[in-house]
Image (cartoon, grey):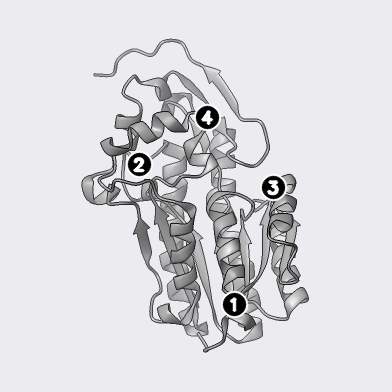
Amino acid sequence: MPSTGANDRVAVITGGASGIGRATVLRFLAEGIRVVFGDVNVDNGDRLVKDAGEPVGLRFAPTDVSAEADVAALIDTAVGSFGRLDVVVNNAGVGGAFGPLVELDAGDWDRTFGVISRGVFLGTKHGARAMVALGGGGSIINMASVAGLGGGGGPLAYSAAKAAVINFTANAAVELAGHRIRVNAICPGLIDTPMVMGKDPAALVGRRSTFQPWPDLGRPEHIASLAFFLAGPDSEFVTGEAIRADGGMLAWGPRMEGAHDQRGLTRRSAGFADGTTGRRSVKRVLDEQPDPG
């Protein structure tokens, strides 16, 4: 990646209105990087622009990352507004389909993959296309999860979609290396975001020590700092990696589902969690499930 000052760089960040995405937008701006961010939650997007002081180096565009036209338009906004593109952070996500495997709705499964893995594909496709045309190389950062690295780290559909992101990242890194475009994934563990903490954050915090050895929760700013490193010249020889930032969770053994749900609550309902999109999540209560074991 050619050497360039932070003040010259331009980044696109999806899912930028909340949680890790919001923290990454603010960190990049603080470092002098101009940012175009997309999010399906327009209220949160507008609020971030105001909270940031409406800087000239910030643009927001309502974006559904599962819709190719939206993603293409987001990339075009960055190039059209600032004349270049150096970084793409494919961060948008949802909790997605949840419940026992035999109760999962196929449409909810497709929606989960549509946001998490298709969104990463589209952001990488259109981001790389612009970077190749501009000829300056770049860095693409895909938000994966420890849930994609093994069993027990999260709901089935979410975990499978994040695993797809990790594999896609490795293959895209190989293909795009000749253009000096680096592609890496970040695999967060338990991060204190609205989507992760849900409606009962105190209960989750109280069980933190059962699935993570590090004594503190991860913060969105931790992941934003890692994204900033991967975005810049200090990581110019790093590509094709899936870097964990999980407080030692995976080193200890992923046990999010078992420890967090000792009473089997996740097996008593099914549906789709829309995270911080502003859309209403769907949940249906199942008949009492027999003990499988």
Residue 10 position in % (x across, y down)? 64, 75
First along the sequence among labels 4 and 3: 3
Disc 2 target residue: 153
Whole-Å distance between the Cαs marked 2 and 1?
32 Å
First along the sequence among labels 1 and 3: 3
Whole-Å distance between the Cαs marked 1 and 3?
25 Å
Amino acid found under the numbered disc labelled 4: Lys
In this picture, residue 63 sits left or right of residue 200: right
Q: In front here: 72 or 250?
A: 250
In the rendered image, the quadrant that contains the C terminus is top left
User: Which of label 4 and label 1 is nearer to you?
Assistant: 4
Disc 3 target residue: 44
Residue 199 marker: 4
First along the sequence among labels 2 and 1: 1
Whole-Å distance between the Cαs marked 2 and 4?
19 Å
33 in relation to 246, above or below: below
Disc 1 target residue: 86
Q: In front here: 75 or 58?
A: 58
- Total labels: the figure holds 4
